[in-house]
Amino acid sequence: MKVPSTEKKGNILFRGVTTFLGTSLISCGIAWMRFSGMGTDPFVTMNIGISESIGMDFGTIQMLANITVLLVMLWFRPKLIHLGTLLGIFFVGYFSDFLLGMLQNLPDTLTMRMLGLLLGLIACCFGVAVYMTADMGLAPYDALGIILLEKLPLRLTYREIRIMTDLSCVAVGFILGAQIGIGTIITAFFTGPLINYFKKKVEPFLTFAQFQKTAR
């Protein structure tokens, strides 16, 4: 599996802005999926369960969970840490909370919730594609699978390890009372293909734009 090097040459400001845009879109996607009430991705599901069980806001729980994984990254793969990692830790959860507060003013209808699920899935996948193209570090949960792949004495693929971690997160979230819905199932099966699709679309444009800015 190709791992972002975090050393790619190019306009650092442009890549930083692109990373921020990508993580902002991920925050929007999480907010929409939480608004839908139909389930979210496994890691968010676990953090929602913890948040609801101890009465602490989601943004703080998301940050603490990411910091925990960051410590593992610091020990085993510090080179995977960059701006994208820090934004994933300190920005995504709180911005998602803020956006969710705004979305609560929308009509709570089945149609609106289904639209929220669709918009959330698209925003999350497009956001991940954008931040991955910028190549400025990995989000802690994404890096965890790579570290486990390298360190576990098992002959498993990254996909198999990711399934294990996803199922573990969903199980913890379910036990703690998080809502497991069709959104959780959809993210499990369609997130990867959608990210790959969007990445193929945005990568040529962002690479060209970065080249243009660097050449000036």
Image (tube, rainbow, N blue to C red):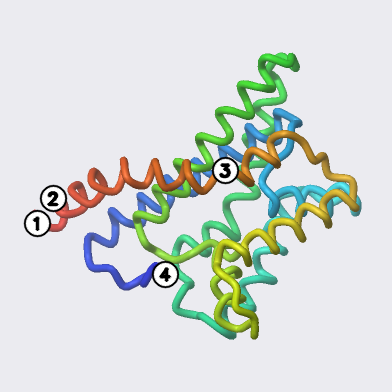
Q: Are marks 1 and 3 in contact (CB under 8 Å)?
A: no
Secondary structure state at the residue bearing disc 4: loop
- Compare residues 37 and 189 and report the one nearer the observer: 189
Quick check: 184 left or right of 89? right
Q: Say which residue appears at 86% left-offset and 47% top-offset.
A: 52
Spot occupied by residue 112 in the image (x, y as percentages of width and height): 66, 17
Spot occupied by residue 192 in the image (x, y as percentages of width and height): 51, 48
Secondary structure state at the residue bearing disc 1: helix
Q: Mark 3 — residue? A: 27
**How many neighbours does mark 3 have within 10 angstroms: few (below 14), some (14-19), or many (20 or more)?**
many
> Quick check: 22 above or below 116?
below
Q: Which mark is residue 212?
A: 2
Mark found first going from the N terminus, 3 or 4: 4
- Compare residues 196 and 90 and report the one nearer the observer: 196
Q: Which quadrant of the figure has residue 28? A: top right
Query: Mark 1 is on which residue type?
Result: Ala
Spot occupied by residue 191 in the image (x, y as percentages of width and height): 55, 44
Q: Which mark is residue 129?
A: none
Disc 2 vs disc 4: which is toward the camera?
A: 4
> Quick check: 20 above or below 79?
above
Quick check: 9 left or right of 56? left
Q: Are marks 2 and 4 in contact (CB under 8 Å)?
A: no
Q: Mark 1 — residue? A: 215
Q: Which quadrant of the figure has residue 168? A: bottom right
Mark found first going from the N terminus, 4 or 1: 4
Distance between the alpha carbons at the discs numbered 1 and 3: 32 Å
Q: Mark 4 — residue? A: 3
Disc 3 vs disc 4: which is toward the camera?
A: 4
Q: Are marks 3 and 4 in contact (CB under 8 Å)?
A: no
Distance between the alpha carbons at the discs numbered 1 and 2: 5 Å
